[in-house]
Amino acid sequence: MDKATAPGSILVVDDTDDIRRLLSIHLKMMGHTITEAHDGREALQLIYNQPFDLILLDIMMPHVSGLAVLEVVKKDPALRHIPIVVISAASDLASVVRCIELGAEDFLPKPYEAAVLYARVKTLLERKRLRDNEQEYLHIIEQERATSERLLLNILPKPIADRLRQERRLIVERLPEATVLFADIVDFTALSTHLAADELIEWLNDIFSTFDELANAYGLEKIKTIGDAYMAAAGLPTPRADHVEAAAVMALAIRDMAVRMTTPRGDPFLIRIGLDTGPVVAGVIGNTKFSYDMWGDTVNTASRMESHGLPNRIQVTPAIYENLRDRYQFEERGTITVKGKGEMKTYWLLDRLPTES
């Protein structure tokens, strides 16, 4: 049977037993399921406790009138979609107008013609089924939109995703200040030769998922993973005054986590971490599989701090040291040769300095 013309669940409300029973008989002959109410009070109890596809409603009833029932139903956002046909002996124009004003879909005077009743009921039920189908489709579309939104926010920062939806053009911005963090697992290649692929990827996913949690906790933006390396930044896409400290705190948290962990083979878990701060260029590249990325000397230098570092140590540039020296403990490493930079003085970030109580 066509869903739009399928039998419905109908509530018949009338305080006159003979009329109520006659309506029920006619509607049951059409295949509908009928529930009867003797007055408006009973009708409201039923309406709030079970779903109906249509309500046939008398006006003049004791306790709670049909007009009162009509007004309550049409003011309730959860019920107003139920079509209501007023069937009443009050056939004067004022009564008809009042019913329509309150939201009734139709008005039939008593005594009613059975053929007219059949036609009105069939039309209103079809209309409600079409409306229900529309709402179902809208709900599905909204679910799919929400899923797409979640997927987009897994790829792009929310401010960038919002701009991309509105501007539909290349998004690139030059930021005068940001702090970049690189973390890389030591001897990952050697480890990968001794583990099954699924075991290796599961372990790496656990590690990077923890890094993601730390980035969320300390307000950094994850930029990407490159093999066994993790890149994040503080101070973008939304600038923040404490971006250097935020990145330093995350770096210390990663180091402390690594000290407590082992690899799947039971060996110590070792990681190198590097930080630099300064101007960067950030934006979205690509037209299909696009991503949010960063470029510039600060990015390159932070990467070199990591690659030229030592296991479970955080190597930083003089810019990081100068920014945090009064609040954090450092150890001067000295001058090292940095690829693409030449001779450069670097420092080890050790910990936060104790604060006076």
Image (cartoon, rainbow, N blue to C red):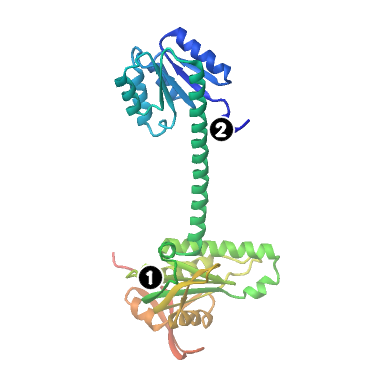
Question: Can you tell which of label 2 and label 1 is closer to the viewer?
Answer: 2
Q: Secondary structure at mark 2?
A: helix
165 or 129: nearer the viewer: 129
> Is 232 situated left or right of 92 in this image?
right
x%, y% of residue 320?
38, 79
Q: Which residue is mark 2?
A: 4
The image quarter containing residue 174 is: bottom left
The quadrant in which the N terminus is found is: top right
Residue pictured at 70% horizontal, 70% vertical: 194
Residue pictured at 70% horizontal, 72% vertical: 193
Could one spot residue 277 in this view of the protein?
no
Q: Amino acid at mark 2?
A: Ala
112 or 242: nearer the viewer: 112
> Is 262 situated left or right of 98 in this image?
right
Q: Secondary structure at mark 1?
A: loop
x%, y% of residue 172?
42, 74
Q: Which residue is mark 1?
A: 235
User: Residues under labels 2 and 1: Cα distance?
Assistant: 56 Å
Q: Residues within 10 Å of mark 2 (few under 14, many from 20)?
A: some
